Amino acid sequence: MEQSSAFIATLGAGRSRGSYALSRHACATVGNKNLWQRKKSLSILGLKVGRGRLCLRAQTSTGAVSNATEATAERPFKVLIANRGEIAIRAIRTCQELGIRTVQVHSTADTDSLAVRMADERICIGPPAPRESYLNIPAIISACEVTGADAVYPGFGFLSENARFADLLEQHEITFIGPSARAIALMGDKSTAKATMRQAGVPIVPGSDGLLRDVSEARRVAREIGYPVMLKATAGGGGRGIRLVRSESELENAYVTCEQEAKGAFGNGALYMEKFIESPRHVEIQVIGDSHGNVIYLGERDCSVQRRNQKLLEEAPSPAVTPEIRQQMGEAACKAAKAIGYCGAGTVEYIMSSTGEFYFMEMNTRIQVEHPVTEMITGLDIVALQIAVARGEPLPLRQEQVGLNGWAMEARINCEDALQAFRPMPGVVTNFLAPGGNGVRWDGCIYPGYNIPPYYDSMLGKLICWAPTREAVIRKLRRALGEMQIEGIPSTVPFHLALLDNPAFQEGKTVYTNFIEREGILDQLKARVQSASQPSGRDAVAAVPAAASK
């Protein structure tokens, strides 16, 4: 703990709003097991532990140290944002609109982040490595006690689907703005999730009945359901721990490789098997439930534009989903959510065949990166709904009141070089201009002069556009991408421009999960770069948006 305590530093004075730091003594003790005991988290420091108290010393904007103060009935509700980047900013904005004070936790690498600047209060919880900061449960719970936070907003990634974290917050009487630990546990393990969905009557992809014991069982199951098959890590995510096996001769090597990758990435090498659906779409249903037994769905999102199982562009609604299929998918998702007493926002993901059959793939017990496209066509604020149901309020609308209006698309803008296998290339943003206009939304975390840390996800932000029709939203997104200026680093803007100009994408009927490879989108992008006669390499990819939009 000495190494960690050395990094947990006080933010500089002169801020317009309150800043906090865990003292060296506090940091050296937050990892003590006493932290995990109800009402004893900071007793080792000789401090009062009642909810709503500032348990450690707080630093004001002038650098003075204030004494711990007890909350009063008049103290406003306060939410601690246990995330970073654009989703932290997204949550802060909604909280500001609701009159809720925010606390932004951050690592030493994120001291100058936009989220830290926007929050009412901020507290440094550790060094850059995620395991020592954004994944450091003791430090985050201690930060709640220090700042008097009433609730934690987890966003996506990091601890958002950690059942242990949700349970510990509940023990400390801190509201977790998400589902219960039980619901997270049921859906977090993909094998358990499939069994739960099967019991709820949700269509399941044919495959193994639970986890595979060894290669021999994998071979038997594959022969029963027929090749091709998919091997998947039960604790997997982010495109890792997945292997496509087209014949029995490939199975053993794929099994060993997938198992080793899963062990290294997730600490769990357990695998299960599913029938591989040829030419599938990735379609997901947004659900939200409250603590009064109500669950509704907010339409679907099509996330079929992917590379190595990583989503790149999403849209709502899906061009392949009819009103009848939407209702079937939505009702199946709500049935599954009700079966586990789900409270909060969640997403039920389906694989959809080219003939319209759909099968459950997984449930994400958190908000999704692509949630803005749903907000754009429903007019609802999903983050506000998350906060409301977490505070015990009933959903403000019924299923029949949910309307879908127009079409929305979201392009994920990452600091990656698409022509170098989407390699992340962080650096300093020397210039940035976000696009504007009617129906254009930018959810981002960069500004001119911002130095992008190399320790985290490469996402700079999301460009979301809305229009009455799919054809119109493609035109609007193309215009907005051409207007966007990001200098100093490469971005995926040129890739999206090449994608939007592809005739098959514009037509929309054959956009399957292998679309990028099948249509040669990267080859088309490479040709654009070469024809633009720009310098090769990093600067070329950063310079071609205008040329690619011609």
Image (cartoon, rainbow, N blue to C red):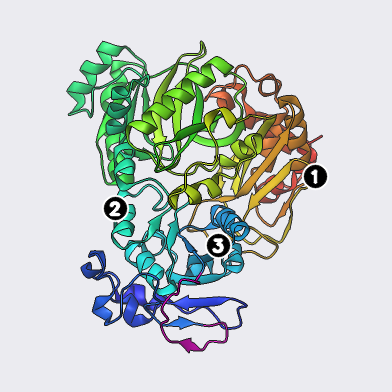
Closer-to-camera residue (163/386): 386
Question: Is residue 103 found left or right of 208 in the rendered image?
Answer: right
Closer-to-camera residue (523/193): 193
Q: Is residue 86 above or below residue 344?
A: below
What residue appears at the point 43 percent right and 28 percent down from the top-left corner? 333
Asked whether residue 532 is in view, the answer is no
* Quadrant, the C terminus: top right
Which comes before the other along the chain, label 3 or label 2? Answer: 3
Of badges 3 and 2, the one in the foreground is 3
Residue 260 rendering spot, x and y as whole percentages: 28, 39
* Quadrant, the N terminus: bottom left
Q: Residues within 10 Å of mark 1 (few under 14, many from 20)?
A: few
Residue 410 rendering spot, x and y as whole percentages: 63, 38
Q: Amino acid at mark 1?
A: Gly
In the picture of the structure, the residue carrying the numbered disc 2 is 164
Q: CA distance from mark 1 to mark 2?
A: 43 Å
Residue 129 rendering spot, x and y as whole percentages: 41, 62
Q: Which mark is residue 100?
A: 3
**Does the CB distance between marks 3 and 2 fall below 8 Å?**
no
In the picture of the structure, the residue carrying the numbered disc 1 is 437
What residue appears at the point 55 percent right and 52 percent down from the top-left corner? 87
Q: CA distance from mark 3 to mark 2?
A: 26 Å
Q: Amino acid at mark 3?
A: Ile
Q: Residues within 10 Å of mark 2 (few under 14, many from 20)?
A: some
Q: CA distance from mark 1 to mark 3?
A: 29 Å
User: Residues in magenta?
Assistant: 60-75
Q: Is residue 222 magenta?
A: no
Asked whether residue 180 is in view, the answer is yes
Which comes before the other along the chain, label 1 or label 2? Answer: 2
Q: Residues within 10 Å of mark 3 (few under 14, many from 20)?
A: some
